[in-house]
Each structure stands twice: as structure tokens, then as C-alpha cells.
Image (cartoon, rainbow, N blue to C red):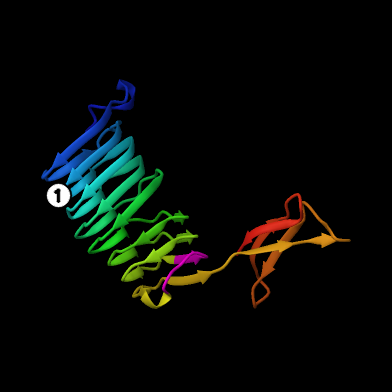
Amino acid sequence: IDGTYVRESGTPLFKDGTITGADTGVSVGGGFAAAHFQDITVTNPTDSGLDITGQTASTLDGFDVTGGNYGVLIGNSASGSMDLENITLDGQTTAGVYYAKDITGTLSGSVVNSAGAAFKYGPNTDNDVDFSGISIASNAVGIETSGSGDISMTDVTMANTKDVVIKSAANVEFVEGTVDSTTVEVTGAGKFTRMRQLDVTLTADAAGIPGASVTLLDANGASSGNGITDSVGIAQDLK
């Protein structure tokens, strides 16, 4: 899909498709190419299941890729936005999802049995990234970054040969969840930080105090987290 399908022309729907043995299952990009992809299965592509090659303003919901070098490849010329919802990627040889450049959009689903990273960020990426409440398991590497954007992971379950690999100055904060810190590899100037969340209850005369500011201080007396108490006096998820 290229610039022929721009948003002003209406957004075509590609649904319930099966693609086997292609070089690339789906290629999107150019002139804010716009389309919606739903319930597409790609089996054994030579290169990638989905390749984002230029500007796009598209959505994807339900995308299964087995085999190939990449499940989803966001190329060096990619830009714009693409939602990647309910993706299922299995058995890629290089990476499940590879961001050579930053794009915006939501992401959900699973990546398993990748011989490389489940999610890989290249040196030209600089956006900060948040993962929350997902499982990243059964891959050679869970998260690998060579970019400059920081990565925050909250309530994520990891179980990979190497859970996190940092090759740049990027910082990775891992909050709650499950991770094997002994498998974390840092070869760049970045840092991996294991963190916990704290709920603070503020009361007076056995009654919760709502609307109060609560600040956590680190060992040097500097603020490391803050929050506001709710209707029953609890400031939640401070870190």
C-alpha cells in the first residue's frame, strides 16, 4: 500500500487474508498511505511479515506471522502512525518487531521464539517507550536497544535467554513485574534499573486524608517520586 491510498481517498479495509511464501507479506508507506488491516496471516515470508517503508496513517488488528527475518519491520524511511494491535509473531530469525525509525501508534500482542530480539530499537530511534502489563518470553532477547530513547517497563513478565540488552546510552527502568537481572546485558553507556512501586496511606484520627501531596525522597534527599492521595487517603504506585 503506497501513497495511492491516502486518507482523503477513504481508507480501504484488507481483511481475512492469507499470504504464504512472499518476500514481504504486507508493505505500507508513502504519502501518508492509509489502510486498515484485520486478521491477516503471513507464513514464511523471505524478509518480513509487515514492512513500513514510508509515511503512513494506518491501523492493524489481528496479524499473525510465522517465520521470516522480521515479523514487523519499521524501516529507515518510516514515519507517521500505525497501530499494531493483537499481533502474534513466531519464529523470526532476526527480530520480532524492529524499529529502525520511530513511529507512533499502539502496540499489543505476543512475540515468541525469536532467534534475535522480540523488540529491537535501532540507533536512529530516540522516542521514549512504555511497556505495561504484557508478557515477553521464549526469545533469545526480550528487549534490545541501540537507540537513545529511554524504556519504561511496568508489570511486564520476562522469560528470555537475555531479558534486556542495552547497546547505547538508553536507560531501561523495570518496575514490578518479573525479570532475571542476571541475564541483563549492558555494553553501552545506558543503565538498567530495577524498581518497585509503593502505596502510601495518609491518615489522621484513623480517617484517610484525600488530596494530600506525598513525596518520596532518595538517599540524598532528592525527590524520587510524588503523588496525590485519593478519596480514602492512598497515594498509589509511587516509585
Q: Quadrant of residue 223?
A: bottom right
* Residue closer to the observer: 26 or 74: 26
The image shows residue 113 at horizontal and vertical percentages of: 25, 61
Q: Is any atom of residue 113 visible in this view?
A: yes
Residues in magenta, as a range: 172-180
Farthest right residue? Answer: 205
Q: In the image, what residue type sits under mark 1? A: Asn
The kind of secondary structure element at disc 1 is loop
Q: Would you place residue 153 above or below residue 8 in this image?
A: below
What residue is at 41 percent from the left and 44 percent from the top?
A: 106
What residue is at 43 percent from the left and 55 percent from the top?
A: 134
What residue is at 38 percent from the left and 73 percent from the top?
A: 184
Query: In the displayed structure, does residue 9 sit left or right of residue 216?
Result: left
Q: Quadrant of residue 137?
A: bottom left
* Residue closer to the observer: 229 or 128: 229
Dot 1 crowding, Cα within 10 Å, few <14, some 14–19, many 20+: many
Q: Is residue 233 magenta?
A: no
* Residue closer to the observer: 26 or 178: 178
The image shows residue 71 at horizontal and vertical percentages of: 24, 51
Query: In the displayed structure, does residue 173 sit left or right of residue 97?
Result: right
Q: Considering the image in quadrants, where does the C terminus appear?
A: bottom right
Q: Would you place residue 170 above or below residue 110 in this image?
A: below
What residue is at 20 percent from the left and 40 percent from the top?
A: 26
The image shows residue 11 at horizontal and vertical percentages of: 31, 25
| Tally of numbered tags | 1
